[in-house]
Amino acid sequence: MDTTTLAPHGSVQKDLSSHWLPKNANNSYNISSLQCKEIDIPEEIFLTLGLLSFLENMLVIIAIVKNRNLHSPMYYFICCLAVADMLVSVSNTIETIVIILMEKQAMVVQNYTLKHIDNLIDLMICTSMISSLSFLAAIAADRYITIFYALRYHVIMTTRNAAIIIVGIWIVSSVSSILFIVYSESGAVIICLISFFFAMLLIMGGMYFHMFTLAQSHTKKMMMQRKKRTAHQAANMKGAITLTILLGLFLICWSPFFLHLLLIISCPNNPYCLCFTSHFNMFLILIICNSVFDPIIYALRSQELRKTVKEIAFCSW
């Protein structure tokens, strides 16, 4: 797929700025000298995955909105995570449609307009990345509180506080993404994105370590007090495990993208680095796959959400 912003080659890309690629590097010469094999991915694959992701995440959002049993901070965060995933699918679908129309000469767009489309797509991808990590951290914090501060959970994580967190994350994600587009020529911006990625991983890793090392002994203490509380604790641990799966999937699907960013900063002219970055379409496929698999994990791990999604899908609400 010769994407407008995400591919290092192609006739469409030449007329557009590229926010995710090495700057001031003779890409064609260095890549060809290394005989780096490019992987051609049909536009139909991108379009299919994008539409599938959009439909799946839309089902999750509608299910959470409709089912009052899912009106809790954790599911509000999951709903926002689904919205973040939709940003990737929407941006991918828009980009693919534009490329197909231009390749078939069914649409003629001026370079100025193409640049705005390019900026819009990169804005959505960047916002999705920042908000996804932030909401994963918010869900981790929510599970952490339910496990270690169960008696105070409804005081700490109120609906009002959850709303403040959600609005704050979207504002920070949007502003940060706009700044990235405006100052995309500066390597400091990419360094900030990479630093944010590792910082959030460290924060969530710390919470995970505390949760899974102390949760067992904490559960035993609760078992000695009340069986009902123990069942509640087990449910909270199930939520923590679900989050672990989501984070693991995020790491698998997004790590090549962050490695790509690291390489275009550290070795933009190195032919081996350029060979890796030339496969950015594969990294984009992984990112889209993350948005496809996330809703499946929600449904598999939550009986209530799975039931509601089925009712909506089969129009039996």
Image: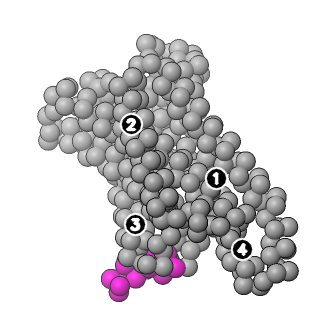
**x, y percent for residue 115:** 25, 29
Q: Mark 3 or mark 2: which is in front?
A: 2
Relative vertical location of residue 8 with respect to residue 201 in this rendering, above or below = above
Q: What mark, if any, has residue 214 been given in the picture?
A: none
Viewer-nearest of discs 1 and 3: 3
**Which residue has dot 3 on it?**
61
Q: Earlier in the sequence, mark 4 or mark 2?
A: 2
The relative height of residue 72 versus residue 30 in the rendered view (above or below) is below
Quadrant for the C terminus in the image: bottom left
Q: Do tag 1 and tag 4 residues touch (Cβ < 8 Å)?
A: no
The magenta segment is: 304-317
Task: Answer few, some or many: residues within 10 Å of disc 1's Cα (few below 14, many 20 plus, some between 14 and 19).
Answer: few
- In this figure, which residue is indicated by the disc labeled 2? 175
Q: Which residue is mark 4?
A: 233
At label 1, the amino acid type is: Gly
Of the two numbered discs 3 and 2 on the same chain, state the one appearing first in sequence.
Answer: 3
The residue at the point 65 percent across, 67 percent down is: 152
Query: How far apart are the alpha carbons under marks 4 and 2?
Result: 38 Å
Residue under the point 64% across and 53% down = 248
Mark 3–mark 2 distance (CA, rounded to whole Å):
24 Å
> Contact, CB < 8 Å: mark 3 with mark 2?
no
Visible in this render: residue 131? yes
Magenta segment: does it hold 275?
Answer: no
Residue type at numbered disc 2: Val
First in sequence: mark 3 or mark 4? 3
Q: Which residue is mark 1?
A: 248
In the displayed structure, 288 sits above or below 4; it is: below
Q: Main secondary structure of the magenta part?
A: helix
**Number of residues whose C-alpha sits closer than 10 Å to that of mark 4, classed few (under 14), some (14–19) or many (20 or more):** many
Label 1 – label 3 distance at C-alpha = 22 Å
Position of 267 with respect to 151 (left or right) is left
Amino acid on which disc 3 is placed:
Ile
